[in-house]
Every structure is written in C-alpha cells, then in structure tokens.
Image: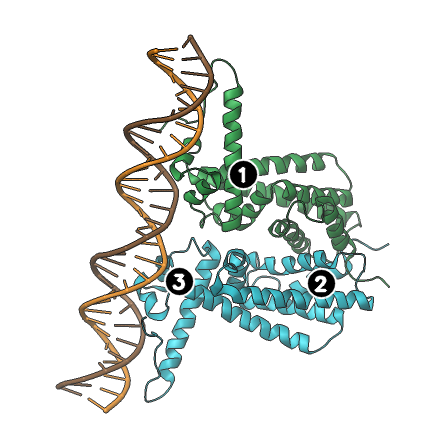
Chain colours: A cyan, B green, C brown, D orange
Amino acid sequence: MPTKKKPQVTASGKPAAAAAQARRRELLDTAAEVFAEQGYNATTVRKIADHAGMLAGSLYYHFDSKESMLEEILRSFLDELWGGYDAVLEAELDPRETLEALVTESFREIDRHRAAVAIYQKENRQLVAQERFAFLAESQLRFEKAWLSTLERGVAAGVFRSDLDVRLTYRFVRDTVWVAASWYRPGGQHSPEEIARQYLSMVLDGIAVRE
Amino acid sequence: MPTKKKPQVTASGKPAAAAAQARRRELLDTAAEVFAEQGYNATTVRKIADHAGMLAGSLYYHFDSKESMLEEILRSFLDELWGGYDAVLEAELDPRETLEALVTESFREIDRHRAAVAIYQKENRQLVAQERFAFLAESQLRFEKAWLSTLERGVAAGVFRSDLDVRLTYRFVRDTVWVAASWYRPGGQHSPEEIARQYLSMVLDGIAVRE
DNA sequence: TAACCTACCAAACACTTGTTAGGGAAGAAG
DNA sequence: CTTCTTCCCTAACAAGTGTTTGGTAGGTTA
C-alpha cells in the first residue's frame, strides 16, 4: 500500500497546506465541469488534465484515482446540500413554508453546484450499486424522507390536496427541481430565487386559470 | 466501403427477410436495455453480446457499429413518438385538451419505449453535437415548438395563467414528463394513463388546497 | 551552500475498447 | 448430393484507457 500523498503541513505553519488544498479544489472544479459536460465514463483523465493545463499523470500527485475525484466532488456537494436542508428542517416551519424553503434551497444549490448536481443526476443510478458510493443511497433515503414527510404533513393539515398520490407527487416535484440543473446557467436572466418562485407558483396553484 | 450486410430476400419469398428483421429488432431491444441501465459509453459491445447470448464480434453481422445501434434505437423511437404527437396536433383541439393529449401520449411512449427514452434523456446533450445525430436537434426543435405554441395559445385564450414565464413553464413540464422514464416500470401499480391524469391534475390545478 | 519539499513532466505499463478477417455448422435450394 | 446462404465463433488488431515509476526545475528551509 502506498502512503497518502496528501501534502503535509510544513513545520513553520499552515499556508503551504492551505495552498495545496486550494489547488485540489481548483482541480476538482474543472474535473466536475468536464464530468458534467461529457459524462463520467466518457471523460478521460487526459481531458481533465488538458482543461487544467497539465499532463494526465500529474493529476495523480493530487488524487488517488479518477474515481476518488468523483467521490470527493459528490461528497462535498452533498455535505453542503444537507447543511442547507437541515437548517430548513430544524426550523420546524409549517408544511407549505417547508416546501417553499426546500425548493428555494434546492435551486440555490443548483446555482452553486451546477456541475455536481448534473453529475449526480446522470450517474447516480449506476454509482449507488458500488460500495464506495453507498453514501449516495443514504442521502437519497434521507432526501425522500424529508420531502415525503413534508407532503404528508401538508395533506394531514389540509393545506395540500389529499386526492393525489403522495409518492407520485414527490417524484414529480423532486425530478422537476433537480433536472433544472441540465438547463440552468448561472448569471442567466433568472436568479435561483426567481426560478423557485415561479416553480412554486406552478406546483402549488397550477397553470390553469381559476374560474 | 463495405457492402451492406442487410439480409437479402431469398428467391422463394419474404419470410427469411422478415425473420432477419425480427432478429435485428430483438437485438436492438436488448441493446437498448443495457444502454439505458449502464449508459451508452459505459456499455461495451461485449456486455450487449452477453445479454444476447452471443459473442461481441457476432453483433457485427447484424450492425455496422455500436453507434449505428444507438442511432437505430433512437430513430425508431422518435418515429413512433412523432406519429402520436402529429395525430394530436392535427386534431386541432383547444389548448387545454392539446396539453392533456400531449402529456398522455408522452406517458404512453414512456410505457412503450422506456429504454429509448432513458437513453435519450441521458445522452441527448452529447449526441446532438455529432453530425450523425443531427436528427435529434431537429426533433428537439419541433418538440419545443409544439409545446410552446400550445402553452401560448392557452395564455392567449385565457385558460392558462399569463403571469408565468412560458419558457420556464415549458421546461418544467417537459422535464418532469420525460424524466419519469427513469423511475417508471411497466406493469407497476399505475398505468400510463393514470400517471398522466395525476400529473395533469397537479400541473393544471396545483397541489395546494383552494380556499 | 546544502538538503529538502512541492508540483509537475516524460515515458511507459497492463488492460480494455470497438472492430475486422477467416472459418464453419446447419439448414434451404437446386 | 452439391451448392449457397445465414448466422454465429475464434482470434486477433490498433487505439485508447487509468495508473505507475522515475526524474527534475524551482522554491523553501536550515
């Protein structure tokens, strides 16, 4: 077994380690862009290296493998996502406010981690089967629990319709939110909050004119 | 240039050619399943051959290349899809009925071509860039036109809300419908028509209870 | 100055990929 | 029976894959 290649902290202080960490993040960001655009399997380490202005082998100074890059990209995305979600859930808002907050938070995450979300959407299916990416299944379960319970609370409280299949509704809502990562571009004409507002208006009140 | 490998019609009649065509369709169906499950790039011709009970090289008796298999899968799907769509559009229903018919037809197509739809969803982005798959871009354009004009007609007629961004609404509706291919399984507890009904109910009237 | 560390390059490795060429078994056609 | 056609197998090819090894310019430390 080779020893860890992680840069050590120099005896004189932390700046060296911080710079190394920043470089890692920089490389992961470019890797995420290429993964999102071309797909994980279709992306070669040589392409990543090209985009980063270096040679393929040099990436292995910073990372153990192509797969570990993917893992780190998804892990750091999910970490931040759950930071936002947990804050919403712990606020114990009423069902409708919770739904609105979750949707808004989701679009904010898409804004911040567009590439990671796109990768997650595309590769999730095949990755969860691998032991290494078991954390994806975990996250998926917590995710489902959070959304389903919110919808069910709403139905019980009489603020959401009771004649709709909750599970079906959950799937539609979930998909519509996350699939936005495939067309959303930061800096476009709609802010994440504006997209969330319009989306919520459609899902909550429908697109038909009331008579 | 190699000559076409397509089985010729024997002198005695058409049954031989029909059988060959049936075999092609059979192989394309298994290929589509594997493509949908593992992704096109991650699928090797050896895996396809495995699922078909033959060796990799043998596939090349029936098809020119891996890519031509993908093309034929997508082409035959889109052909049937547009058969259904055109019938709806030519019926010249009012906006709301058109929307309902398009959605229902879409879920029926997902029921019939689940694998092809999943492949389309995943690979469309990367494929349209290739000249060979230019027909995907064409289809995409017609698709957008059909949906957008329906929504706009509805807004003009006063049956759809005018305060929503039509383009944004189109994207939400489009994505939610097609992404269903990733979780839909034929023979489940919901028929395509039932899924369409619930989906339309949500999109048209919203999930919030009216006061 | 000497020793060391960081971040990269150059070149190769074993392996997998899509694809091809030649052959052969089994049935149909004559 | 002979000949042809259909459909698959065996075996290999060249290109591309992720990864490893050894080296080295340039800055930092002592």
* Image spot of residue B151 (x, y percent): 71, 48
- Is label 1 on the same chain as label 3? no
C-alpha span from label 2 to label 1: 39 Å
Report which quarter residue B57 is drawn in: top left
Q: Chain of mark 3?
A: A
The residue lying toward the viewer, choosing from B114 and B188, is B188
The residue lying toward the viewer, choosing from D7 and B108, is D7
Mark 2 neighbour density, 10 Å: few (under 14) some (14–19) many (20 or more): many
Q: On the rendered image, what quadrant is the N terminus of chain A found in?
A: bottom left
Question: The disc labelled 1 sits on which kind of residue?
Answer: Asp
**Residue of label 3:** A66
* Residue plotted at (69% across, 41% down): B105
Residue A200: give its label.
2
C-alpha span from label 1 to label 3: 32 Å
Helix, strand or loop for disc 1 = helix
**Residue of label 1:** B29
- Is label 2 on the same chain as label 1? no
Q: Nearer the viewer, mark 1 or mark 3?
A: 1
